[in-house]
Image: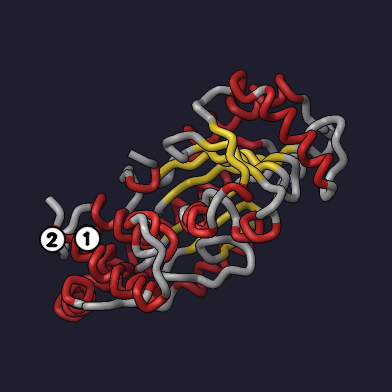
């Protein structure tokens, strides 16, 4: 099962963890724009693909249809900017489990990304460092001993803090501790469905382990605050149950529904499932709903391409199908 459909400790609050390492190879200019130079970079990586291992496959963006590219964006495997701006020259290395995705030819020569469900920074970092060391030994990096080259980020938190209106205080505190907090798809992205992305700002003069520890401390504090907020919400039991079951009722009975409405209703559904109020759904079904209500992954799931109004109809059908499946 792919990592984004799995559950783990703290996944009631933290959806996923991501470690991202930006690297540039020796012998190539930075910020490659020339098509010939990008092809040379890609060829060097492809020539060493088998030695890198991990079941990675080489895929070019220009060989993908738009729905496939957007499905990767929706899973946070590639950035919207990479999908849009590098659609003709960009490429990726990805494994079947999709917990490893390496973007090639973006702002940096390669961006190594490793993903895990829930709050699992240490294991995610260990795998990222392992892959990073192997690529460095094979290809050679451009390294400055003083400034280094690391960047990393953690994906996706929260619902209760937003509903109790305490999220602004948390956002201000996070920023004061040197962390970025953004929407689900990163920079310049609005918050959707009470999901936030937290990442470190500082990369100079600090080790990978220190970055992970700093992020982990902040996120654990947020987990505590989130769970306290949920206890506060649960005091008004009838009102909370009403919100959750109204959302569940719409999702199970609607004939058509937009992505935006489904996403916001699903935030209430997940809260109800996490608190044990809504027992009709499992964690796996909630994870499937989060993935397959998204426009591109909905169409990938059904194997067909649809116009917007048709997607709204098909989305309602898929929601019912996932909710009622055995």
Instruction: Please tell me in which quadrant of the rendered image residue 322 appears.
Output: bottom left
In this picture, residue 166 sits left or right of residue 232: right
Instruction: Please tell me in which quadrant of the rendered image residue 310 appears.
Output: bottom left
Instruction: Please tell me in which quadrant of the rendered image residue 134 appears.
Output: top right
Q: How is the model colour-coded?
A: secondary structure
Earlier in the chain: of badge 2 and badge 1, it is 1
Residue occupying image coordinates x 24% and y 54%: 285
For mark 1, give the secondary structure: helix
**Nearer the camera: disc 2 or disc 1:** 2
Res. 12 in view? yes
- Mark-to-mark CA distance, 2 and 1: 8 Å
Q: Residue 69: x and y, percent?
A: 54, 54
Depth order, front residue of 112/161 = 112
Depth order, front residue of 120/315 = 315
Residue occupying image coordinates x 53% and y 30%: 56
Q: Which residue is mark 2?
A: 280
Q: Residue 48: x and y, percent?
A: 67, 22
In this picture, residue 241 sits left or right of residue 230: left
Residue 135 sits above or below residue 112 on the image: above
| Total numbered labels placed on residues in the image | 2
Res. 232 in view? no
Asked if the residue at tag 1 contacts the one at tag 2, i.e. Cβ–Cβ closer than 8 Å, the answer is no
For mark 2, give the secondary structure: loop
Q: Which residue is mark 1?
A: 273
Mark 1 crowdedness (10 Å alpha carbons): few <14, some 14-19, many ≥20 = some
């Amino acid at each position: 099962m792919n990592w984004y459909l799995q559950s783990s400790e703290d996944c009631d609050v933290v959806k996923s963890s991501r470690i991202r390492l930006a690297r540039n190879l020796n012998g190539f200019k930075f910020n490659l724009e020339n098509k010939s130079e990008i092809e040379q970079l890609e060829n060097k990586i492809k020539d060493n693909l088998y030695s890198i291992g991990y079941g990675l496959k080489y895929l070019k963006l220009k060989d993908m249809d738009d729905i496939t590219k957007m499905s990767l964006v929706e899973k946070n495997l590639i950035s919207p900017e990479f999908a849009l701006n590098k659609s003709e020259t960009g490429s990726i290395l990805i494994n079947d489990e999709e917990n490893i995705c390496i973007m090639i030819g973006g702002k940096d020569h390669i961006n190594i990304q490793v993903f895990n469900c829930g709050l699992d920074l240490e294991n995610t970092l260990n795998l990222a460092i392992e892959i990073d060391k192997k690529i460095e030994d094979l290809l050679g990096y451009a390294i400055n001993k003083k400034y280094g080259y690391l960047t990393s980020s953690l994906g996706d938190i929260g619902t209760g803090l937003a509903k109790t209106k305490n999220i602004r205080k948390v956002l201000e505190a996070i920023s004061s501790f040197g962390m970025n907090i953004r929407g689900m798809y990163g920079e310049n992205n609005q918050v959707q469905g009470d999901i936030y992305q937290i990442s470190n700002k500082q990369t100079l003069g600090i080790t990978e382990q220190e970055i992970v520890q700093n992020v982990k401390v902040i996120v654990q504090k947020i987990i505590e605050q989130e769970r306290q907020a949920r206890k506060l919400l649960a005091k008004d039991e009838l009102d909370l149950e009403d919100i959750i079951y109204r959302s569940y009722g719409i999702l199970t009975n609607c004939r058509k529904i937009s992505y935006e409405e489904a996403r916001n209703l699903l935030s209430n559904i997940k809260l109800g499932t996490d608190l044990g109020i809504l027992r009709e759904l499992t964690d796996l079904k909630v994870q499937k709903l989060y993935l397959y209500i998204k426009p591109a992954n909905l169409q990938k799931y059904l194997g067909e391409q649809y116009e917007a109004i048709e997607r709204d109809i098909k989305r309602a059908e898929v929601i019912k199908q996932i909710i009622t499946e055995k």
